[in-house]
Image (tube, rainbow, N blue to C red):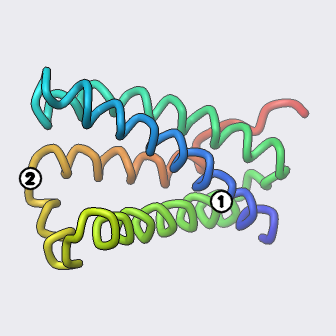
Amino acid sequence: MGRALLAGCVYFALVFAAGFVLGVVRAFLLTPALGHVGAVVVELPVIIAISALVARWCVRRFAVPGALAARAAMGALAFALLMAAELALSVFLFGRTPAEHWAAYGRLAAQLGLVGQVVYGLLPVFVARGRG
């Protein structure tokens, strides 16, 4: 199980870094042109594709067993770290209260993002380990 948890931490860190860069692009380029929902719709398939590639790489790199428990632990840890990091950014970078952060999930753009985050958390269960 240790390999799965280490893989989950690396999976989180790599995808979070990519998501941070994509978030800047979304905020400054896509949102003004397409609106919040349109920008998320454009960004979402890109970050899911990146997540799938990183999940597969992490599963291979850390030799995470194909057992449901190991893969689910990897994804659940990565998802929990992502949600905690997003809350921390919301509070410390954007000055929102935790209640304001959670209330934002009432908007469509945030709901679409949450769907993407759930997919991100599930991807380790579904990616193939492949050959060495």
Query: In the picture provided, is 2 more to the left or to the right than 24?
Result: right
Query: In the picture provided, is 125 more to the left or to the right than 34?
Result: right
Q: Quadrant of residue 131?
A: top right
Closer to the camera in the image, 36 or 93: 93
Badge 2: few (under 14), some or many (20 or more) residues near its Cα, within 10 Å? few
Give the x, y percent position of residue 103.
12, 68
Query: In the picture provided, is 48 more to the left or to the right than 44?
Result: right
Could you tell me which residue is drawn at 22 percent across and 44 percent down? 112
Query: Pointer 1: what residue?
Result: 8
Query: In the picture provided, is 13 more to the left or to the right than 5?
Result: left
State the count of labels: 2
Question: Quadrant of the image for the N terminus?
Answer: bottom right
Give the x, y percent position of residue 87.
34, 69
Of the numbered discs 2 and 1, the one sitting upstream in the chain is 1
Q: Amino acid at mark 1?
A: Gly
Q: Amino acid at mark 2?
A: Arg
- The label shown at residue 35 is none
- Helix, strand or loop under label 1: helix
Marks 2 and 1, how far apart at CA: 28 Å
Query: Pointer 2: what residue?
Result: 107
Could you tell me which residue is drawn at 20 percent across and 51 percent down? 110
Could you tell me which residue is drawn at 61 percent across and 54 percent down? 13
Residue 92 sits above or below residue 22 on the image: below
Give the x, y percent position of residue 72.
59, 61
